Image: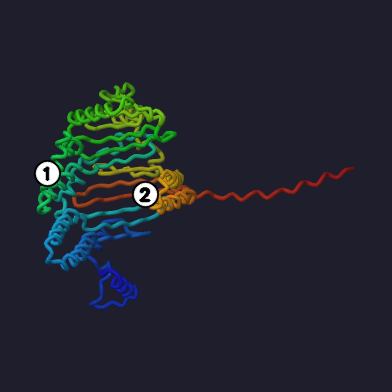
């Protein structure tokens, strides 16, 4: 399809049904769209389809036209080669399709994303798909969790290696020198980003939010899966020791309040003011970081099978998604106070503007922040959501997505009672 006025003309022609053999075909005639539509729930309220490969082709065509105008400039052609080779890494999606239906107070969105042929062998796809799927998404999620997110995540080590190798081999003249300088910079500081940070984390994570007031007291916990628990323990201990050496106010001690061995607590006066007691340690092959010992204990009790999981929560049963078998992502979020949270966030823009220096060149930014702060009472009215849940499964050649948004029941207005006129006095004899 054309871009600009040409696209408008094509749409008007299709809407007017003035078609002939030379006319642009409707999307309904596209075999890919027909195949995509058959793979998903029939649309009732909404359908969205995007042929991602065609989008990449259009972008490349536009860029190629611009590069062709400077075909005699060697530097421009070098940039062209680098840009197009980078596109090959990211052109991995064939199409994406979504449909929506409404049932009562729930809105269901179902989606399918398909990879291009051969894309699963590309590094960027491997970074998204070679992690271990979850057989039990609720393994660390307590029954009373306010929300959670479980995902196979991203293999950042593979992404890092791919980027470094691309710079080294695909950027002529300077690429190898840039990588050498970066490696020398790390060596001088006794650091290897991939070895010390990325390589021992496999990508999968579990985040659990627990109820509390204020929320930070609730004991939320983050679990990161590691490739080598022993190596992970060494790296964590080194990081904790480095943290303890930053200031005399930072105290690192064993955490006896955690029902697992090897956990340490990190104390700072600021944390005491926030009423949080961070703890960190290893459980099996998971690095566990918790805001409080109690929150970590709740998550570990579910993992051991001594406490019920979120699946036993009546609200989650009614509003969440509970897929079985290998899954690459599941989440649930409590949105009952979404408007209040957004209003608070907007109000903080005004506070940020008040701390900015009174320089004239910063005046537009201060004005923008002030305007955003004035939106606080408006966005606070977004109080009709109850929750949002999602699930995602990798099928070998793409992903299947499910999302459900639940709305609060509409309050029924009760008409005021009509005032009753006073009774007349009883007649006297």
Provide the secondary structure element on which disc 1 rests.
helix
Q: Position of residue 87 (x, y in %)?
A: 18, 56
Q: Of all residues shown, which one is farthest toward the front?
A: 359
Q: Label 1, label 2: how many angstroms apart (C-alpha)?
A: 49 Å
Q: Position of residue 26 (x, y in %)?
A: 28, 70
At x 13%, y 59%, the residue is: 78
The residue singled out by tag 2 in the image is: 404
Q: Position of residue 334 (x, y in %)?
A: 40, 42
Q: Position of residue 45 (x, y in %)?
A: 38, 59
Provide the secondary structure element on which disc 2 rests.
strand
Mark 1 or mark 2: which comes first in sequence? Answer: 1
User: In the image, which is nearer the foreground, mark 1 or mark 2?
Assistant: 1
50 sits left or right of 126 in the view:
right
58 sits left or right of 351 in the view:
left
How many residues crowd around disc 1 within 10 Å: few (fewer than 14), some, or many (20 or more)? few
The residue singled out by tag 1 in the image is: 180
Q: Would residue 342 be visible to someone looking at this image? A: no
Color style of the picture? rainbow
- Where residue 345 sits, quadrant-wise, is top left
* Quadrant (top left/top right/bottom left/bottom right) for the C terminus: top right
């Amino acid at each position: 399809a054309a871009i600009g006025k040409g696209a408008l003309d094509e749409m008007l022609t299709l809407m007017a049904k003035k078609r002939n053999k030379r006319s642009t075909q409707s999307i309904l005639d596209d075999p890919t769209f027909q195949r995509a539509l058959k793979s998903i729930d029939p649309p009732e309220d909404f359908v969205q389809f995007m042929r991602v490969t065609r989008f990449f082709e259009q972008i490349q065509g536009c860029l190629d036209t611009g590069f062709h105008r400077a075909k005699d400039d060697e530097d421009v052609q070098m940039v062209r080669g680098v840009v197009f080779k980078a596109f090959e890494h990211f052109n991995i999606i064939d199409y994406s399709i979504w449909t929506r239906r409404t049932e009562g107070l729930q809105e269901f969105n179902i989606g399918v994303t398909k990879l291009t042929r051969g894309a699963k062998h590309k590094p960027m796809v491997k970074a998204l798909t070679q992690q271990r799927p979850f057989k039990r998404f609720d393994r660390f999620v307590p029954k009373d969790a306010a929300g959670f997110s479980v995902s196979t995540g991203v293999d950042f080590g593979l992404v890092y290696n791919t980027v470094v190798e691309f710079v080294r081999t695909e950027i002529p003249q300077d690429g190898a020198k840039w990588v050498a300088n970066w490696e020398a910079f790390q060596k001088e500081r006794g650091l290897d980003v991939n070895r010390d940070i990325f390589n021992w984390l496999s990508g999968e994570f579990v985040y659990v939010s627990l109820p509390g007031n204020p929320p930070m007291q609730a004991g939320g916990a983050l679990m990161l899966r590691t490739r080598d628990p022993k190596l992970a323990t060494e790296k964590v201990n080194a990081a904790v020791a480095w943290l303890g050496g930053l200031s005399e106010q930072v105290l690192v001690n064993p955490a006896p309040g955690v029902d697992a061995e090897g956990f340490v607590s990190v104390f700072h006066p600021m944390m005491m003011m926030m009423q949080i007691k961070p703890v960190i340690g290893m459980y099996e092959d998971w690095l566990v970081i918790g805001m409080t010992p109690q929150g970590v204990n709740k998550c570990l009790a579910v993992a051991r099978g001594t406490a019920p999981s979120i699946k036993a929560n009546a609200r989650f049963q009614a509003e969440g998604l509970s897929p079985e078998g290998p899954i690459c992502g599941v989440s649930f979020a409590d949105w009952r106070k979404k408007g209040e949270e957004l209003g608070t966030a907007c109000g903080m823009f005004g506070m940020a503007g008040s701390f900015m220096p009174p320089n004239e060149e910063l005046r537009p930014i201060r004005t923008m922040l002030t305007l955003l702060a004035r939106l606080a009472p408006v966005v606070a009215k977004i109080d009709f959501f109850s929750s949002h849940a999602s699930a995602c499964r990798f099928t070998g050649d793409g992903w299947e997505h499910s999302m459900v948004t639940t709305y609060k029941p509409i309050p029924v207005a009760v008409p005021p009672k009509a005032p009753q006129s006073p009774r007349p006095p009883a007649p006297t004899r």
